Amino acid sequence: MELELRHLKTIRAIADAGSLTRAASVLGLTQPALSAQLRRIERALGGALFERGRHGVTTTALGELVLERTRIVLPAVSDLQREAALFARTRPDGQRQRLRLGATHGPLLGALVDRLADAVPGTTVSTCASWSERELAELLAEGRLDYVLTGTCGSAPPPQCPHVLWEEIAVDPVCVMLADRHRPARGREVDPAALADEEWACVPGDGCFADCFTAACARAGFTPRRMYETDTASCVHLVQVGRAVGLCRATFPPTPGLAVRPLAGTPCPGGTCWACTRPPSSRTRQPP
């Protein structure tokens, strides 16, 4: 096996976390999968990088050597990617000719692309959708995306990455998505307690929303029966066929057969953030 940058990132994540279990959570892997990956990396490097103990892992002498190199290699590669990306998307006259957008919110991303088509008609726009705020922030920091639109849960901060600046642009409270024939859809807002017997659907995420939603249900006097975590189209389908009640943002676009209603008392507020990455030489410039 040839050593790759992702292997160096894995080693760094394990060292920073201090245990395979915590590192697996950060990397979005299971602990057995991460252990198997580490064994392959150690075979490629010729020895053990970590010693396992009851309280976590400690680096070996070889591990310290490799970590010292990662502290040089990883930032250097990130800088190279960011500078190359900036060069590739800029015309000789300094005008941006390409925008690469990322988002966790499909409907808002589509609306943003529509607005950009009118605002900057000569610009090529590409998009990347992901449920993971952390993944999008890392792509942004590496220079593989230019801007990211993402939602946060309540006052929870977005993921912090080098060279990434976050700016809150709006508050977009959580609403419930119902089949329009559903009785609670007849009102202007929905009491969460009226949905105690329902099953739920929402898109996945790596923030604290699931815990906040469960706490909101507990305050309303019930425990959610079941939560389906799936993509937006599947959530819409589950609601349309009466299988579940969906959670969505207030900005969810009108959809035939569906009604979007705010939850009474706004038990799960959310903030929408705009993130941009700027090289040191242009940090005083404003995003387009």
Image: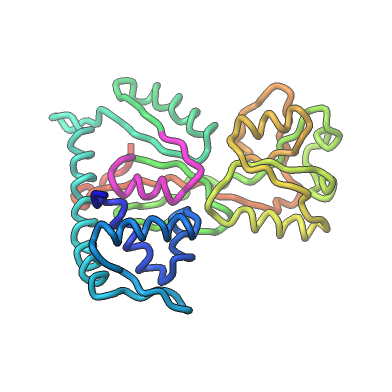
Quadrant for the C terminus in the image? top left
Q: Is residue 251 left or right of residue 96?
A: right
Q: Position of residue 103 (x, y in %)?
A: 46, 39
Can residue 25 be seen here? The reply is: no
What residue do we see at 18% from left, 54% from top?
76
Q: Position of residue 108 (x, y in %)?
A: 52, 34
Q: Which residues, given as a range, are shown in magenta?
A: 128-145
What residue do we see at 23% from left, 33% from top?
89
Q: Within the image, what quadrant is residue 223 found in?
A: bottom right
Vertical position of residue 107 compared to residue 226: above or below: above
Residue ranking furthest to the bottom? 54
What residue do we see at 44% from left, 75% from top?
56
Q: Nearer the viewer, residue 135 or 14?
A: 14
Q: Is residue 203 magenta?
A: no
Vertical position of residue 145 compared to residue 138: above or below: above
Q: Position of residue 119 (x, y in %)?
A: 37, 25
Q: Nearer the viewer, residue 146 or 13?
A: 13
Q: Is residue 266 left or right of residue 197?
A: left
Q: Nearer the viewer, residue 242 or 114?
A: 242
Q: Within the image, what quadrant is residue 82 found in?
A: top left
Q: Is residue 130 magenta?
A: yes
Vertical position of residue 38 compared to residue 108: above or below: below
What residue do we see at 76% from left, 55% from top?
217
Q: Within the image, what quadrant is residue 68 found in?
A: bottom left
The count of marks equals 0
